[in-house]
Amino acid sequence: MRTPILCICAGLALLLSAFMPQGVQAQEQAADTLNAFQASLRHIEGRAEVQGVVNNGFTPLWMAANRYGLSCVEGNYGLLRGGVFHDTRHDVDRRWRIGYGLDIAFTIGRKDHFKFYIQQAYADFEYKKVRLSVGSKERPAQLKNNELSSGAQTLGINARPIPEVRIELPEYLRLWSWGAVKGHFGYGMMTDGRFQRSHVAPGVHYARHAFYHSKAAYVRLGNEARFPLTFEGGLEMACEFGGTIYNPLGSTLPEIKMPSGIKEFFKAIYGGGSDATDGVYSNAGGNTVGSWLLSLKYHGKGWDVRAYYDRFFEDHSQMFPLIASRLDDGKYASGPLPGSSTGKGYGYRDGLWGIEVTLPRNPAVTSLVYEHVSNAGQSGPIYHDHTAALPDQVSAADNFYNHNLYQGWQHWGQAIGNPLFLSPLYNGDSGSLEFTANRFRANHFGLSGDPLPTLHYRALLSYITSWGTYNMPFDAPRHAASFLLEARWSPEKLGRLCTKGWSLQGAFAFDRGSLTGNNTGFQLSLRKKF
C-alpha cells in the first residue's frame, strides 16, 4: 500500500529539483538551505481560539458550512483550538523558503462527546515559484470569494483537509505580459475510514484506506494596466481510488480490495481503468469528479465586478458539455435519449453562475456576491447500459456526489465541494452517508463590510429547492431558507489595555423549511494571534 505513495513522493521531489539552476555549487546550496531553515524560525505566528455554539438540534447550515469541517453539525458544542504557523510570504526575497503549520483542536458536545483533531500538519518547501507541499493543510477555493460564496463544487473548503503530497504553482507564473498560469498535482489518502464504518448501517457499503488524487490548472489572460478586462479559467479534477470496499453489493459480498498498484495511480490522472464490480459495463476507475471554471473581471477605478461559472461533472459523463452525444460503434450517449423533449440543454443547465461586486471604500458594504446554483439535471433522468436488444448506451442520471462503492464526495461526513448539496451528517442517525438531496436549485446572496476599522461583518442568505435524487426522489419538492449574520470585533486597545491580536466574534443563524428543518443557533468565539 505504501510503495506507490513513496514512488510518487520521490517523483515529485525529482520534479521539484528539476527547477534548480544547473551548475549551482554544493556550498551555495548548503548556504541557501541553512538560510531558509533559519528564516523559518522567525515570523512564527501562534493562534488560539475558544468557541461555543448553542442550537436547538442541528447547527444551521451557514454556521457549520465552509469551515474546513471543523464544526459539529448536530447538538451544542464547544471548541478549543491552537496552532503555530510560518508563512513563506515572510521570506519572499529568498530563493528557497520553508513554511509549516501545526493546528490541533478539541471539541466537546452533546452529540460528539469529546474529540481530538489534528486539523492541519504540513510542511511547504519552495524554490522560487514552485512549491512541494506535504501534509494536511487548509487550502482556499480558487476563483471564489471564500468568505461570501456558497463554495466551489469540486475542491471546496467545507470538509476537513485531506493529507496530500502535491507539487504546485501556488501563485500565477507570468509567461508573457498578457498570460499567466498556476496549478497543482498531488496524491493523498482519505482519513475517515473508521468514521464511515461507525456511521453506516449494517450491510451499507463504505471504504477504508482509499487513496486520493487531485490536480488543477488555471490560466489568466489580460493586463489590467493596459485593458480593464481579465479572464481566468481552469479545470479541477479529483479521484478516490484503491483501498478496501466493505459491503460493495450489500451483505452478499463482504469486501473487495481495490487495485492500488502504480498503474492505478497513473490511471487516476486521466480517469482510466474500471471498478471490480463494473463487469462488461466498465466506467472510470474509482470516484472521479471535476469542474470547469470560468471568470471574467472588469477592473474599474476603485471598484470591480466579476462574473464566474463553475460546472461540475462526474466521471466522463458531461465532462465536455458541448459534445452532447455520440452514437457510433461505441454506442453511447451522454444525456437523455435522442428526441427526448427534456434532453436539450442538459449540457449547460447544471452549474454555478455567480457575480461578485467590490465597491469603492465605504463604511457600509465592501463586497457583494450573488450565485445561482443548479444541479437538477445531472445529464437527464435515464441511465441504460447497452444490451443485445438495445445497443445504445445512455450515460445519464449522474447522481452527483454519490458513488456505488465509495461513500461519495465527502470527508468525515461533510461535502468536499459545495455545502448546498446538504452534507451526509445532516442525515442524522439514518445509517446513511449518502447525499439525499443532490438534485436542487438554489439562489445565494452574500455581503460583507467594515463599518469601523475594528469591526467586520458578513451576511449570507440562501434559498434551496430540492427534489431528492433520481433514485430516491422526494414525494414533493422540499425547500430551505438559510441565513447567517456574523460580526468580528478586533480592537487594538480597550482604554489603557493593549488588546492587539485579540478578536471577539459572534454569529446568529437559522434554517427554515422542510429540507433542513427549523434550526436556530448562536456562536461566540474568542481568538488570539501572537
Image (tube, helix red, strand yellow):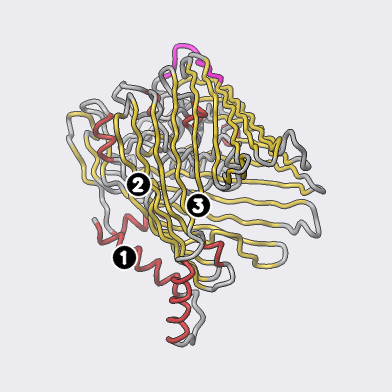
Amino acid residing under circle 1: Cys
The quarter of the displayed image where residue 428 is located: top left
Q: Earlier in the sequence, mark 1 or mark 3?
A: 1
Q: Position of residue 24 (x, y in %)?
A: 48, 85
Three-letter amino acid code at the position of disc 3: Phe
Residue lying at the far front in this picture: please name it.
496
- Residue span colored magenta: 473-481
Residue hosting label 2: 118
Residue 358 lies left or right of residue 25; in this view the side is right
Name the residue beneath numbered marker 1: 7
**Mark positioned earlier in the residue sequence (2 or 1):** 1
Earlier-in-chain disc, 3 versus 2: 2
CB atoms of marks 3 and 2 within 8 Å: no
Q: Secondary structure at mark 3?
A: loop
At x 42%, y 38%, the residue is: 69
Q: Viewer-nearest of labels 2 and 1?
A: 2
Q: Which residue is mark 3?
A: 530
Q: Secondary structure at mark 2?
A: strand
Residue at the spot x=43%, y=17% of the render?
A: 56
Front-most of 480 and 472? 480
Residue 256 screen position, x and y as percent: 21, 42
Instruction: Give the CA separation, mark 1 to mark 3.
Output: 39 Å
Residue 388 is situated, as x and y percent measured from the top left of the image, at 34, 34
